Amino acid sequence: DTEVTQTPKHLVMGMTNKKSLKCEQHMGHRAMYWYKQKAKKPPELMFVYSYEKLSINESVPSRFSPECPNSSLLNLHLHALQPEDSALYLCASSTAGTQKRAKNIQYFGAGTRLSVL
Amino acid sequence: DAKTTQPPSMDCAEGRAANLPCNHSTISGNEYVYWYRQIHSQGPQYIIHGLKNNETNEMASLIITEDRKSSTLILPHATLRDTAVYYCIVRHNPQETSGSRLTFGEGTQLTVNP
């Protein structure tokens, strides 16, 4: 099973709302990622978690707050977003470098399409 | 990670081979070439990767030139479902412990025509 599940598939929120995006995988991967993808553009890395610790933050504004409560789950908490934050948010997972037979191939979910009004 | 250059778009007839080129002239010795594709409204999908030898799997073949400055992804018998954006990505040895960064370029929009 190479499935990464993201919920919800679609989300509409106002600029004062607080919402969360969720991501789940059961492949035993210890690295998880959040990407942001604007229309007709390639995905851009936002955060990387390795062994449940934040290892990379690509200077993402604090209105995006990631959380990795355990090795299977990754959340992205959203607060006071702007309309320009409307995008497809992609979650991915991979083996981490120290895992046996690590190839670090990233498996992506289908994404959450977020609209900020 | 080394920068890659791909044509913005290509067309291919259904049933024919699709050959997608990628230039990575600044690639260094420990950097791998990865290919992903993204079908409209889906997440990117891993296709294949290699270091210096040619590679083949059930989806595609990867041909890397001897000097490693360019590569070609080959879909041997393209179908309509292969219509997607194809990304060539070069990155460091995947044994790093902190999770592996993927830097996507603009990719190639492959359209398979009936």
Image (cartoon, rainbow, N blue to C red):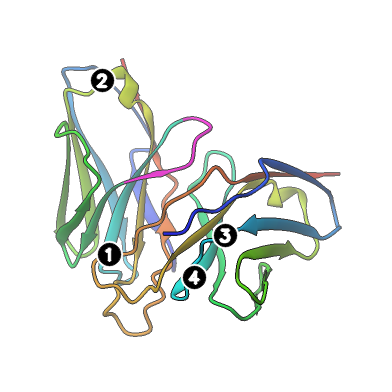
How far apart marks 4 and 1 lie (CA) works out to 19 Å
Disc 3: host chain: B
Element under label 2?
A: loop
Q: Which residue is mark 1?
A: A31
Proximity of marks 2 and 4: CB atoms separated by less than 8 Å: no
The correct choice, above or below, for A23 with respect to A86 in the image is below
Whether labels 1 and 2 share one chain: yes
How far apart marks 4 and 3 lie (CA) works out to 11 Å
State the image quarter where residue A64 is shown: top left
How far apart marks 3 and 2 lie (CA) works out to 36 Å
- Residue A93 painted magenta: no
Element under label 3?
A: loop
Majority secondary structure in the magenta region: loop
Whether labels 3 and 1 share one chain: no
Residue at 30% in and 54% down: A33
Proximity of marks 3 and 1: CB atoms separated by less than 8 Å: no
**Along the line of sight, the residue nearer the viewer: A3 or B49:** B49
Element under label 1?
A: strand
Locate residue A71 relative to residue A9 in the image: left or right.
left
Whether labels 2 and 4 share one chain: no
Q: Which residues are magenta?
A: A39-45
Q: Position of residue A62 (x, y in %)?
A: 14, 34
Q: Which residue is mark 3?
A: B24
Locate residue A85 relative to residue A77 in the image: left or right.
right
Q: Position of residue A68 (x, y in %)?
A: 16, 55
Q: Which residue is mark 2?
A: A82
Q: Which residue is mark 4?
A: B32
Q: Residues within 10 Å of mark 4 (few under 14, many from 20)?
A: many
The correct choice, above or below, for B47 with respect to A108 in the image is below
